[in-house]
Amino acid sequence: MDALSAGRLPPPESPHAWQDALSQAVVLFDEGRITHLNAAAARLWGVSSERAAGRPLLEVLRRHTLEALAERGGELELDVSGRTLRCSAVPGALIVEDVTDHRRREAELREATAILSHEFRTPVTGLRGVLEALEYAMPSEMQQVFVKQGLQEVERLARLVEDLAVGFRPTRARTVPLSEVFARAERLLASELGAHAAQLHFGDDHLVRADPDKLLQILLNLIENALKYGPRGAAVEVRACARGAWIEVSVSDEGEALSGTEHLFQAHTRGEGAPGLGSGMGLYIVRSIVQGWGGQAWAERQGGRNVFLFTLPGVAGLT
């Protein structure tokens, strides 16, 4: 026999029941004392609505900023135990929403934008140099060399655009001799080497397993840094050696000793006295790419030189 047939009516539904379906925490209050917490608010502050009812706002919310917000109205964001809470107050109610994931996605988007702007800079610079060179009369053979170089940079730009959809870790790994990537880097940096009156020396060749474009990006970042921070006319050395199944590549310069090099690999960080403008993303990108293929990237001082090193998978038996 149900309640109706027995002449009994079911208890009326709570007037606040709909609030329990909300993802936001809702605190109702009157004259500074809580009258109701919805389910999300009860979870957030770890107290049931029944126990909170009648108690002062500060006693339950445990933050003067929230008490003041409830009194004056308005909005604010608050960091609580590693979470970001967006709080808004209207007469008689405080609404709190956890926006931690939203803020994290915004930060990731800003970081991705900085990485892309940094990575696009090199091929765009290369294309500018090619087009400026083609403005002048030159033998057809040399002209073809510049056209080929320009096409390579256009292809690289196209691959970067594709990376917008698949992320930033290497996705086109192949077996490649380091000398091939060294040659591309030297060609692209020719004007900068001339401007700094610097020499670029490469060591032994090795076969590695990597995305050539990503590997080129790493080398360009490290060599450009060596040119910026090293003295004019000094040599920049790029060396490679086998470390078991890995190849360790180092880029060294004769610049002044760096202190606390680990922080240089953090996003939006530049070295002391860095010339010109920059995003501070170069070494962060280097480490992100290297870690993507399972390697490591670090810096140290060796024999009066600053040395930046990274490892990548090797392929035994150079052919």
Image (cartoon, helix red, strand yellow):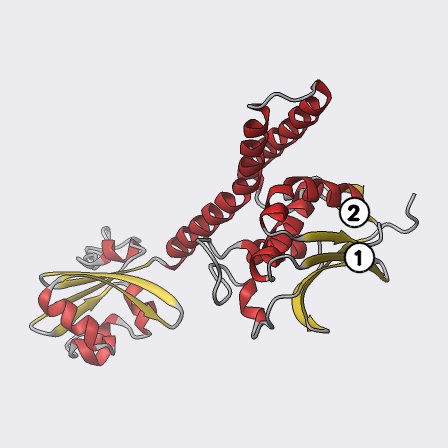
Q: Quadrant of the C terminus?
A: top right
Determine whether the residue tagged by mark 1 lies in a helix, strand or loop.
Answer: strand
Task: Name the foreground residue: 179 vs 267.
Answer: 179
What amino acid type is highlighted by mark number 1?
Answer: Ala
In the image, is residue 278 above or below residue 257? above
Give how far across and how far down residue 43 sits, in percent.
34, 68
| Residue 87 picture quarter | bottom left
Q: Look at the numbered discs 1 and 2 and tell me whether their residues touch, using CB distance below 8 Å.
A: yes
The quadrant where residue 203 appears: bottom right
Q: Position of residue 164 (x, y in %)?
A: 53, 38
From the viewer's perspective, is residue 18 above or below residue 256?
above
Q: Of helix, strand and loop, which one carries label 2?
A: helix
Residue type at numbered disc 2: Leu
**Outermost residue toward the left?**
31
Q: Residues within 10 Å of mark 1 (few under 14, many from 20)?
A: some
- Where is mark 2, residue-wise? 178
Query: Along the polypeptide, which appears first: circle 1 or circle 2?
Result: 2
Give x and y (percent) for residue 146: 66, 27
Q: Residue at x 56, y 57 (%)?
A: 228
> Left or right: 10 with respect to 70?
right
Residue at 61% from the left image edge and 66% from the top image edge? 255
State the residue lying farthest toward the bottom.
59
Q: Nearer the viewer, residue 54 or 217?
A: 217
Q: Is residue 154 above or below residue 108?
A: above
Q: Which mark is residue 70?
A: none
Neighbours of disc 2 within 10 Å: few (<14), some (14-19), many (20+): many
Looking at the picture, tell me which residue is in the foreground, 231 or 26. 231
Is residue 69 among what the camera can see?
yes
Q: Position of residue 232 (x, y in %)?
A: 60, 58
Which disc is residue 240 wearing?
A: 1
